Amino acid sequence: MKLLNIKIIAFICLCFILLAACQSDESGESKEITEPTHITDTVKITDCTGLQKLIDETPSGGTLDLPDHCTYRESATLSKPITLIGGDGVTIKGSDVWSDWLQRTDGLWESKLSVPSFGAANLECDPDQGDRCKWKEQVFVDDNPLVQIAQGTDPSTGQFALDKQRKIVLHDDPKDHKVEVTMRTFWIKGSAQNVTIDQFVFRHAANDRGLGGVDFGGNNWTLKNSSLGFAHAANVSMARVAGSLVQNIDTFGAGQVGIVGNYANGKIEGGRVHDNNIEGTKPSFAGGGIKISNPVNLTITGVEVDHNHDNGIWTDVPTSPQKIVISNNKVHHNPGDGIRVEVTTNAEVFGNLVYENGWERTKAGIALNASSSSNVHDNILAWNYNGIEIRNPLRTDKHKDEGAYDKVSDIHVHHNKIIAEDKPGDDDKLALAWIQAWKGGNIFEPSANNRGNDNEYYFTTKEDGQNRYRWSSPYASLEQFNSSPGEENGHYLTDAEKDQILSSNKLPARPEAH
């Protein structure tokens, strides 16, 4: 019996030793390096070694399957077709953990290390935010971002600054806290085609305008089932590539915009885009949730887009040909336009749930600005500042190549449900508005073929003389509006119909306080 007890104790000790050997610290460094096991074209990794080395060892067209719970503090460049599979907790961070701090005589805490010189970001900042959007440096304490203030000034709690040697200065004692300082400008980029990136967590990157923490560098890139947060500019960039797919990602905390693209050809599907533009980028400077310029063939569908500063979904800048589909998204609590189609053509916007948008900047749930040949139908809009707005502005004052967009034609708005709150005295708060914003506009000309029909409306009070609609002039009554090309056969919803629509679509039963 004594011998048996000794054997049992030895077996238990061996188990603890093996378990300890398998553990790796958060930096991604393993106590023991195990050679990768090649299974056909898949490289199956059993420990947390250097990511770039593993990518380089994976055959072209192969799959790199990483172990769960690894953190890689490095950037990776892809030069060949590859599938990267992360897994539970697999993380790529552009930051390092800093643990060496000294308390100064003034009580503030200063790092022993200095951050790299990233240069100023090519961004335009909100006037009330100073130059903060131009500063790429980042500090996170226990996973929470600190706000950077001007170099050489003294930070308060929740802030950080740089000194002249580019050392980090903190207000609070960093002892017993995890302090991460961004040291790299991207997570993954490359020129390869046919790339798939699946099941990763990405955090912290000091990137610049137009660049993503994950930066699509070739055709047929897929990014899916991943969480991306806190790149200084965009978390994801799908610029000048075809066949892109962004699927079921959670993207938040970007300094400028969650997803950006230029000449994008592909699909954004599922997932959530929220709480972006946290570094004070001027909203009109591509700040917000999704901003795609020069979209070629683009579909945005099934995405929840919320609490972005400023616009939620935004397409902008012409190219030819264009085909844009924005469908079945849930767009809410964006202070600018919920969905903004600007200076583009051939857009179809349908099936979207759009609510509580536009309140900080008197914007709309859905806005078409200087766009033509587009179809807006079967959307449900509730409690936005304005419902649907079609605007015909002058575009040649600054953009000499956009003369064609001084004209607006072939816009069809129909079969939408628009539920709105009355705001006494706000005659610019409209359910459906067609606006000629310059005297040379054509939006009301019969040859422009702009029209609306069969839209359904609900207001929290009965008609009381306050304007609710607009064609060539404002209208206080739906009957008058129905006599214009802007609406035909529009009618009001009953209380019961309104309640059923909101309930069945899980929309708020009443507006928030504004």
Image: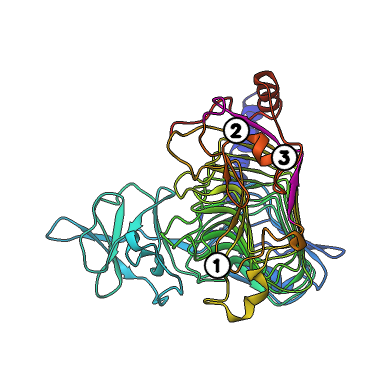
Q: Which mark is residue 74?
A: 1
- The residue that appears at 74% across and 51% down in the rendered structure is 451
Contact (Cβ within 8 Å) of mark 2 with mark 1: no
Mark 2, residue position: 9
Image spot of residue 294 (x, y percent): 68, 70
Instruction: Give above or below for 118 relative to 19.
Output: below
Image spot of residue 162 (x, y percent): 28, 67
Instruction: Give above or below for 214 relative to 190.
Output: above
Q: Is residue 40 magenta?
A: no
Q: Residue furthest left?
A: 105
Query: Quadrant where the C terminus lies?
Result: top left
Q: Is residue 461 magenta?
A: yes
Type of amino acid under label 2: Ile
Front residue of 405/254: it is 405
3 or 1: tag closer to the N-terminus? 1
Q: Which residues are magenta?
A: 450-464
Q: Residue furthest bottom?
A: 400
Q: Quadrant of residue 431?
A: top right
Q: Residue furthest right?
A: 40
Type of amino acid under label 3: Asn
Mark 3, residue position: 416
Of the two numbered discs 3 and 1 in the rendering, the one whose residue sits closer to the viewer: 3
Q: How many neighbours does mark 2 have within 10 angstroms: few (below 14), some (14-19), or many (20 or more)?
A: few
Q: CA distance from mark 3 to mark 1?
A: 48 Å
Q: How many neighbours does mark 1 have within 10 angstroms: few (below 14), some (14-19), or many (20 or more)?
A: many
Q: Quadrant of residue 258?
A: bottom right
